[in-house]
Image: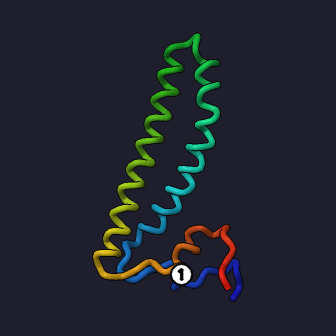
Amino acid sequence: MDIDRQDSTTTTLPGAPRWLRAVLIMDRAGSSWYIGLGFLFAPLLVVLDPWPPLVTAAWIAIGVFGLWLGILGIFMATGLALILKSGRTVPEEYWRSVFEDLPRSR
């Protein structure tokens, strides 16, 4: 099987909401950006310190982004709970389709 081509059985999961895969991918990408930007946030606040409205805008931006990640977490937990409620498990192939850069098991 070609590694670049995804099998439809790995990207869909019976009993899972159709939006779960997108939420998992967005949560993973957003979390990595949030952590990375967190290292730049303190120096940014020092630079913006003379301008209180810009400091407020920076705090609002980081807060809204954190709220978005929290909402994605709620959707992710809901989707995974729906799968477990239906009595199914999430196979490894499905997780690997979400985390595409991980090496595939043979």
Label 1, secondary structure: give it.
helix
Q: Amino acid at mark 1?
A: Thr
Q: Residue furthest left?
A: 85
* Residue 99 drawn at (x, y percent): 59, 67
To which residue does mark 1 refer?
10
Query: Residue 76 in the image: x percent, y percent?
Result: 40, 61
Q: How is the image coloured?
A: rainbow
For the C terminus, give its image quadrant: bottom right
Q: Look at 60% across and 18% down and name the residue there.
A: 48
Number of callouts: 1
The answer to whether residue 86 is above or below residue 59 is: below
In the picture, the quarter occupied by the N terminus is bottom right
Image vertical order of residue 74 relative to residue 82, above or below = above
> Relative to residue 62, is residue 83 depicted above or below?
below
In the image, 103: left or right of 57? right
Q: Is residue 5 left or right of residue 85?
A: right
Residue that sits furthest to the top in the current view: 50
Badge 1: residue crowd in 10 Å (few <14, some 14–19, many ≥20): some
Question: Residue 45: x, y in percent?
Answer: 58, 22
Determine the residue positioned at 57% across, 74% down. Answer: 97
Residue at screen point 58% across, 10% down: 50
From this view, report whether residue 13 is shown above or below residue 82. below
Q: Position of residue 55 (x, y in %)?
A: 52, 20
Q: Residue at x 63, y 35 (%)?
A: 39
